[in-house]
Image (cartoon, rainbow, N blue to C red):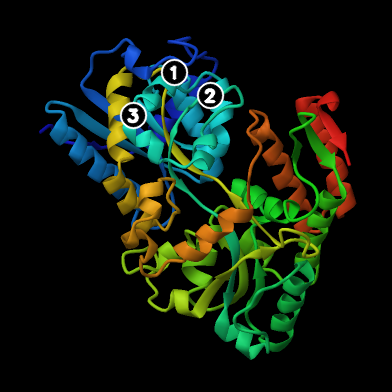
Amino acid sequence: MAKRLIGAVSSIALAGLVLGGCGTTPASGSGGNGSSNSSSGGGSSNTITVAYQQFGKPPYFNEEWLQQSAKAFEKDHPGVTVKLEPIEASENDFYTKIDLMMKSASTAPDVVTEDTFLINADGSAGYLQPLNDDVNNWSDWSQFSDAMKSGSTSNDGTIYGVPYSTDTRGLYYDVNIFKKAGLPVPWNPKNWNDVINAAKAIKAKVPGVIPFYCQVGKATGEATTMQTFEMLLYGTNDTLYDTKTNKWIVQSPGFLDSLKFIQTIYSQNLGPSLSTVLNAQAGNTEVQELMPKQQIGIAIDGNWLPGNWLSNGASPWPDGTKDYQLTAMPTENGQAPGYTSMSGGWALSISKLSKNQKLAWEFIQTACNKQNMEWYDINQGNLTPRNDIASDSKYQNAPGQFFKEATSFTKFTHFRPANSQYPSVSTQIQTAVESVATGASTPEQAMQQYTNNVQRIVGAGNTETK
């Protein structure tokens, strides 16, 4: 068996990549919905590279999963080497670096982990290989839920990746803090006022803790957009994008109310200090430091969070899922369906410039089989996109997780717009949220600036107001 290489992308290499990748155009490759098996990418190497994000404190379960998958793959493919390339970067920096890598045949990995919200944009940009023929000839594809398949499919039906994890989001609350504040346990808020009032009660009766924690900085990227703003917006009567008119909704009552909620949290000192929340490590600080010390009353976050507290997690805490409970995020006024959530996920994709597309596809099949994916989802704390894993008692009863509760949120969950312009719009949401949280703008001013910026990006004719 060939020795498996685990190579890090050094800062020097990345600097050279930025200089060398700029100005290059992806080659056309085999276009349309063709199979990746029909092309070897023009190379004959027996090494395939897998690029992925590595961030925060170890253990890195995504790396362990890929290592296990690589070992199994090499055993089944004598003479083939899998080279893992961890990219040590925060969320936004990873997106930038991986796009730069895929612009040039000399740096493009064979397999890449893609946040599903970027798949449409990266596919449209010519960075990713269509996989329609591949998945349609793969028996395991029938085990993937239709909702998760849609997350890695573009508007024109092109499939650009195989999902390996998904998620939902809700409210975590500390039962001990709630009892001290005289709040009910279990807690099932029915509207935004219930959430705000609980945070106020914690501030008044339990000094020294953060009543409500949510991401509001540009540095935390999509966590700010999706986990905070869209969790609010999709709990109103409005959305971000009108699928009937195919236009971005740049102004609406729900948009303004979402910004006003954030203003209330931060103007009334119900949230963390700005120095804590306005940096790329804000998520790790929340989950790995503040919550284990029981210094957060309520946090809006994803179902994967308790994975940090497992015995082999980044911040082991045996009582984590006893001291914190998970409940659904209510809609603004309790209107039907009563609760809301947002779902996303990650997928394995093949670079359009891969020199070994056939081997890359075979590696994806190995990494995303039931055995390997179940290990990853249980240890990482992600919801599985595979139906056969979701029905497995080993998964359902995994200790230290909220799989059952989090899975129930899929009944009312939402997905981000499957539009290639979404990543650019998302950055404008982050700017608006941060400006309101810091007090630099009123909600009205931030919404107007958002309107101006989005109209400049997508064209005024592709926007509307409600």
Q: Position of residue 312 (x, y in %)?
A: 31, 64
Q: Position of residue 2 (x, y in %)?
A: 13, 32
The residue carrying mark 2 is 123
| Residue, disc 3 | 138
Residue toward you, 21 or 19:
21
Q: Amino acid at mark 1?
A: Ser
Q: Is residue 373 left or right of residue 292?
A: left
Q: Is residue 413 visible?
A: yes
Image quarter hosting the N terminus: top left
- What residue type is disc 3 on? Trp
* Location of residue 391 with respect to 252 vertically, above or below: below
Q: Quadrant of residue 353?
A: top left
- Determine the CA span between mark 3 and mark 1: 29 Å
Mark closest to the chain's N terminus, 3 or 2: 2
Horizontal arrangement in the rendering, residue 299 relative to residue 378 (left or right): right
The residue located at (50%, 41%) in the rendering is: 148
Where disc 1 sits, the SS reads loop
Dot 1 or dot 2: first in sequence order is 1
Choose the circle earlier in sequence order: 3 or 1: 1
Disc 3 secondary structure class: loop
